[in-house]
Image (cartoon, rainbow, N blue to C red):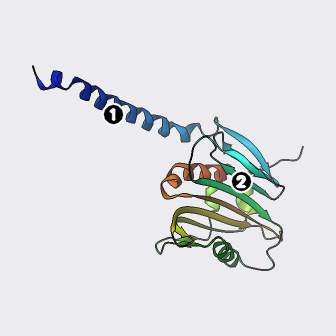
Amino acid sequence: MDIFSNHIWEWLILLSLIGGAFYTLKIIGEEKSTFKDESYEVQFSNLSLMIPNWWTIVGQTSEALRFERTDTRYDWYANFTYLPQHDGKTLPQLLEEKLDLEKIEFDMDVVFETDSRVLFRDSEIQEFFQEIIRVEGKASQNVVDRIYYDIYLMRSQNDAGYFIFESRSSVLNGLVEGPYFEESLAELSFIRES
């Protein structure tokens, strides 16, 4: 007998695992292209958000939305918040306050981006948010917890308030949900009055 027939079960298990891995890669590769088809619209303030259908609203007020994955045990959430007053503080000052409050310290190699309007596909949104700051990357929370954190602070020139959009997860889960968080923001648009 040859080596294949002596280890038939091992070969079948190995081939099944390889086939399953290729199938998973194919499905994940198609998810981003089907984002719009598999999303639902959520109204927040005067904005419309496209949200993946596997994100569940777990908290909602007039000034805040919180999403989590309730179908998995992912250590992940996304918050969309509107704060009515910035008290004359700059976005970097507001960001520093937010990070201090959450006890989040980004790794040294993380870059602070001061204009992410190119992310938005709607030109009206790009013009509305005149000031934007974004930070994305690995960080520590409460000194010991390693996280992946993506935060946007945005405001218009003629608004006393500002928006904070944030996605927080364990380091590995950030790679899974992070692209959908960015895609949700890219699809951001104004709610048209009828």
The residue located at (56%, 46%) in the rendering is 73
Q: Position of residue 37 (x, y in %)?
A: 64, 35
Report the front residue among 3 and 168: 3
- Quadrant in the picture for residue 119: bottom right
Report the front residue among 69 and 96: 69
Position of 190 with respect to 184 (left or right) is right
Q: Which residue does the numbered mark 1 point to in the structure image?
A: 18
Q: Is residue 139 above or below residue 44?
A: below
Q: Position of residue 170 (x, y in %)?
A: 52, 57
Q: Which residue does the numbered mark 2 point to in the structure image?
A: 66
Q: Amino acid at mark 2?
A: Arg
* Label 1: few (<14), some (14–19) or many (≥20) C-alpha neighbours in 10 Å: few
Q: Is residue 166 above or below residue 14?
A: below
Q: Amino acid at mark 1?
A: Ile
Q: Secondary structure at mark 2?
A: strand
Position of 39 with respect to 141 (left or right) is right
Q: Is residue 148 above or below residue 1?
A: below
- Quadrant in the picture for residue 82: bottom right
